[in-house]
Amino acid sequence: MKIFEKNLYLAILSFYILNNNMVKSNELTNSIQNWQNNSFIAAKNTKKLKGRIDQEETAADDLMLQGKYTEATKVYKNVVAKHKDSQTAAVGLGMSYAKQFKLDAAEAQFDKVLAKYPNNCQAHAGKAMVLFNRLQSSSTTVIKNRDAMLNQAQSECNLALQGDPGMPEAHYYLGMIYKDEGKYQDSITEFNDAIKNDPKYSEAYSGRGLDELKTNDIAKAMESFKKAIDINSGNSTAHYGLGESYLQQGMLDQALKELNTSLYQNRNSAPVHLAMGQAYNAQGNNVAAIKEFQEAIRIKPENPGAYIGIAKIREDRGDLELSIAELRSGLELMPNNSDLRLKIGEESLKAGKLNDAIKEFENVLSIDPQNSLAAQGLTRAYYLKANREASGAFFASNEFEQAQTLIDKAVAMNPNNMELRLAQAKMRALSGAKVDLANLPKPTSDGERIAYAEACLASNNFAQANDEMNMVINNAKTANDTFAIADLALMIKDLPAAKQAYQKASTYPEAQARANRGLDSVAKAYDGARQDLTLASDLASKRQYASAVDKYNSAIFNNPLSADSRYGLAMVLEKETPRTSAKYKEAVVQLRAYLALSPNMPAKEVEKLNKKIENLSEKAYKLELKEKREKGIN
């Protein structure tokens, strides 16, 4: 008879006494006495049996705490075989399987417990752990069913917490699920609940630290990792997190020390190998870095950071084709990964594959509509395309309209993002619309200054673009930051800024070789532009206007700041037959660029050129009306 039954008897006894029913009262008193006698005998027998079970289970639990999971499995099996009704031993057996990553055996054990005891909270938490750990697999079946498995794991956690709201394990795995979904604040809340119910829960501290890293709170993250290590120095995740914290602060030696400790404790950790690759890369040890990145991929092939790390090393060596190939091998496993597609777009831009770049940036914006880096990349690609093609400033294709729509959508979703708004302004300038950047707030960060400079270049405000790029270059504090600016400037063909940045980068230790490669690329761009300009001028003098247009455009593509190339193209477009409104409009754009690039031109020459621009604009307007009439357009 259970306690609540005894209480019920006593309540009824009180009722009979109060109502003077002594017969019933005496009968009930005898029943209670018999129950007490029987309970005492049963308790003595149970105590002897329970003592043996507790002793064995305690031994198994101790083995689990020591990480001796194989030995723990043997003890739990022994207890379960002798005492089939021991729920704790049955759950412990499932946990020991799970800790050895024998997930099928663990799941079967938890299912066996739940079939007999559907409300066993620990078994539900164990099921959640198994489901979450299955997500570490590189199986395509698992990858395809990832969302469904996360949802199922979350349901198991919730079932566990319904029965036991204070269960640390359920809070911990719910935190892990939220972290995997990118819900970092919700994840932190769950880890805090786990710690509240078990202050010695080392894994909960390290899980919280990883979330704090993701939210850029490095100081708090380091506190969490150090607390986790104080509780359990064998917590490999905590050592990894502390190493990652040092890495993000540029403390490379400290980072490698912690990462090596983590790796000693868990040899097959893809994140640790990835972080070590990044640390070695930052030290300039590219051979070791590639080895670590490749090991991260071997352990977990769907690891975008490792592919990007190798691609970056290939890029720094000037092997853009190899870099893109590396990224595409990752894309085969992760076709919807926006980071890989973004990097392929950037590499394609540097390789001059503008259409490939446009395609990838549009793919990223389709997956992640608010991705400002993709929006900037897309506008860079179109800016370069505008400089490469004869009618570049007046795109009327469905492709260009689709790109504008994607960027307009991104701005609508995030109207306060300065870089997105500048990308939108750049696209409008490329379409031929007049853009007044004065209506936008002044940039306050280097990222915004670069975007502002690009928008200025697209709208022929070359002096302001130069001022913004100068400020960004002067603000760069490390070789890596300076090279990043130099590479970007070279990519968008802002050759003066690229030259200035590479020269600054060359002053940093062990950066001379890479800086020289960059300066060689700048010199080649200048030389190529000069050769194209010379050939274009020669073709124009021979009235071979179509070929001259191609060469002028090639000269402008290599060096958009070449005033002579702009002027030469405008003159040829005015003369080339058949005369069209598009050619005259393009000539107007080039003459305006020529004026902006010639700030010291005499006033009379400026006036003369402005009259020519006015005349060409009028001709373009009349021709456009005629073209519409011929096409039957009102």
Image (cartoon, rainbow, N blue to C red):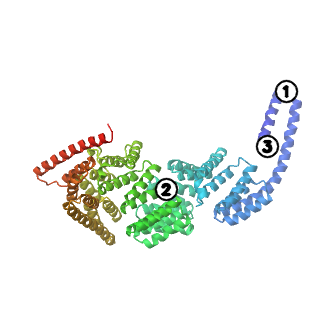
First reached walking from the N terminus: tag 2 or tag 3: 3
Q: Given the image, on which type of amino acid does mark 3 rest?
A: Lys
Lateral position of residue 585 relative to residue 216, left or right: left
Badge 2 is on which residue? 337
Q: CA distance from mark 2 to mark 3?
A: 58 Å
Badge 1 is on which residue? 20
Q: Residues within 10 Å of mark 1 (few under 14, many from 20)?
A: few
* SS class, disc 2: loop
Q: Is residue 169 above or below residue 507?
A: above
Q: Position of residue 476 (x, y in %)?
A: 31, 60
- Which residue sits furthest top? 19
Q: Residues within 10 Å of mark 2 (few under 14, many from 20)?
A: some
Q: CA distance from mark 3 to mark 1?
A: 27 Å
Q: Is residue 589 above or below residue 232?
A: above
Q: Given the image, on which type of amino acid does mark 1 rest?
A: Asn
Q: Residues within 10 Å of mark 3 (few under 14, many from 20)?
A: few
Q: CA distance from mark 1 to mark 2?
A: 81 Å
Image quarter hosting the N terminus: top right
Q: Residue at x 28, y 53 (%)?
A: 453
Lateral position of residue 272 relative to residue 459, left or right: right
